[in-house]
Image (cartoon, coloured by chain):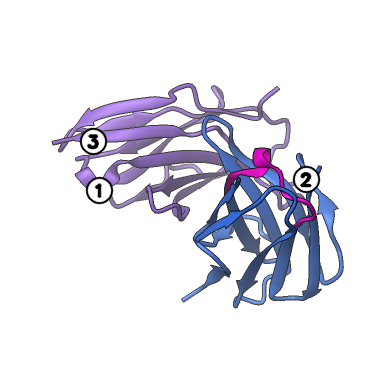
Amino acid sequence: DVKVTQSSRYLVKRTGEKVFLECVQDMDHENMFWYRQDPGLGLRLIYFSYDVKMKEKGDIPEGYSVSREKKERFSLILESASTNQTSMYLCASTPIRAGTDTQYFGPGTRLTVL
Amino acid sequence: AQKITQTQPGMFVQEKEAVTLDCTYDTSDPSYGLFWYKQPSSGEMIFLIYQGSYDQQNATEGRYSLNFQKARKSANLVISASQLGDSAMYFCAMREISGGSYIPTFGRGTSLIVHP
């Protein structure tokens, strides 16, 4: 059974804190993604990675960075959390030639920044 | 311009009735795939159904079917015999394949509430 896991389901942080969101997949997928989901806005791509140590900006990368040191792990970093980063964060993965294959999503992390 | 448009922010349906969730898309790529996902209140995204641009028949998966009208660039999700557990957010997504992109575009979602 394919699996994408995220380190926390719920997270509460204070403004200015450094926040790490971890995502791990066990499917040997090359591509990994971080999305942010807000009501009425759908899923917006923050960053994605198609290989170890490779990363590409998505639609809303400002205020975020990522790290991919190992194939199975993709981390999202909020260097200095702000209240407007309160959101649901979803990680996903696909094989390199996704084609018709769906993305596999993690359970999501609901982040609240106070 | 949005590549995926879901015009219904919210939908209500009576239990056991059928419901159609609208999705229109915009692409010039001849090869693409369309996906529907369900997101219950727990937050996880559940893949429901896939339709390829060259598929001749509409995709079906149990109570889910995709009404694919290529000329209209429409990919509506039909849920037959709605159940209370179908109450959730539903997202339409498209991946353009010819260009080698593996990044799908998502619509803004439709919230479905099933009444008993």
Colour blue belongs to chain: A
- Asked if the stretch drawn in magenta spans residue A64, the answer is no
**Secondary element at image label 1:** helix
| Residue A72 image offset from top left, x and y in percent | 69, 75
- Residue of label 1: B85
- Dot 3: chain letter: B
| Residue A30 image offset from top left, x and y in percent | 73, 69
Residue at x 75%, y 46% (from the top left corner): B98
The answer for how far apart the CA atoms under marks 2 and 3 are is 35 Å
Residue at x 86%, y 69% (from the top left corner): A53
For the record, the magenta segment spans A78-88
- Residue of label 3: B114
The hue in which chain B appears in the rendered picture of the protein = purple
The answer for how far apart the CA atoms under marks 2 and 1 are is 33 Å
Residue at x 66%, y 30% (from the top left corner): B3
Asked if the residue under mark 3 is in contact with the one under mark 2, i.e. CB atoms within 8 Å, the reply is no
